[in-house]
């Protein structure tokens, strides 16, 4: 069964899910991945890497919450 990459629209057999936008991406669209813990693996795509708040959350090994500013108000 093949799936289409939601970023580049290529046909792929194995996909990873970006933890910051939720899209199913192929290996060439994945910018970076790291182990946040023994069982948790964080993956960020190239589009989310250009967003500074999402990149900062990735570097701090945590998930990004898009509505964090509106919740505080």
Image (cartoon, rainbow, N blue to C red):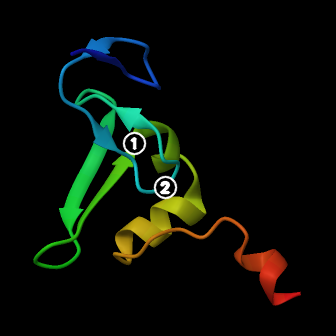
Q: Quadrant of the C terminus?
A: bottom right
Check whether the beta carbons of the residues at disc 2 and disc 1 lie within 8 A of each other. Answer: yes
Local crowd at mark 1 within 10 Å, few (<14), some, or many (≥20)?
many
Callout 2 secondary element: loop
**Place of residue 26 in the rendered image (x, y in percent of width and height, measured from the top left):** 28, 28
In the displayed image of the protein, which residue is found farthest to the right?
Answer: 73
> Which mark sits nearer the N-terminus, 2 or 1?
2
Q: Quadrant of the N terminus?
A: top left
Reply above or below: 67 against 33.
below
Of residues 48 and 68, the one drawn nearer to the viewer in this rendering: 68
Q: Write down the quadrant of residue 33 in the picture.
A: bottom left
Left or right placement of residue 45 versus residue 37 in this view: right
Reply above or below: 41 against 8.
below
**Place of residue 7 in the rendered image (x, y in percent of width and height, measured from the top left):** 46, 25
Which residue is denoted by mark 2 in the rendering? 20
Where residue 45 is drawn, which disc sits there? 1
Please name the residue shown 36% across and 70% down the image.
Answer: 59
Please name the residue shown 43% across and 17% down the image.
Answer: 8
In the displayed image of the protein, which residue is found farthest to the bottom?
Answer: 72
Work out how far the residue at label 2 is from the one at label 1, CA to CA, in angstroms. Answer: 8 Å
Please name the residue shown 40% across and 76% down the image.
Answer: 62
Of residues 30 and 23, the one drawn nearer to the viewer in this rendering: 23
Left or right placement of residue 9 versus residue 27 in this view: right
């Amino acid at each position: 069964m093949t799936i289409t990459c939601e970023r580049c629209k290529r046909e792929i057999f194995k996909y990873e899910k970006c933890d910051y936008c939720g899209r199913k991406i192929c290996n060439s669209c994945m910018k970076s991945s790291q182990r946040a813990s023994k069982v948790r693996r964080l993956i960020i795509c190239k589009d989310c890497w250009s967003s500074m708040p999402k990149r900062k959350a990735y570097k701090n090994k945590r998930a990004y919450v898009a509505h964090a500013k509106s919740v505080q108000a």
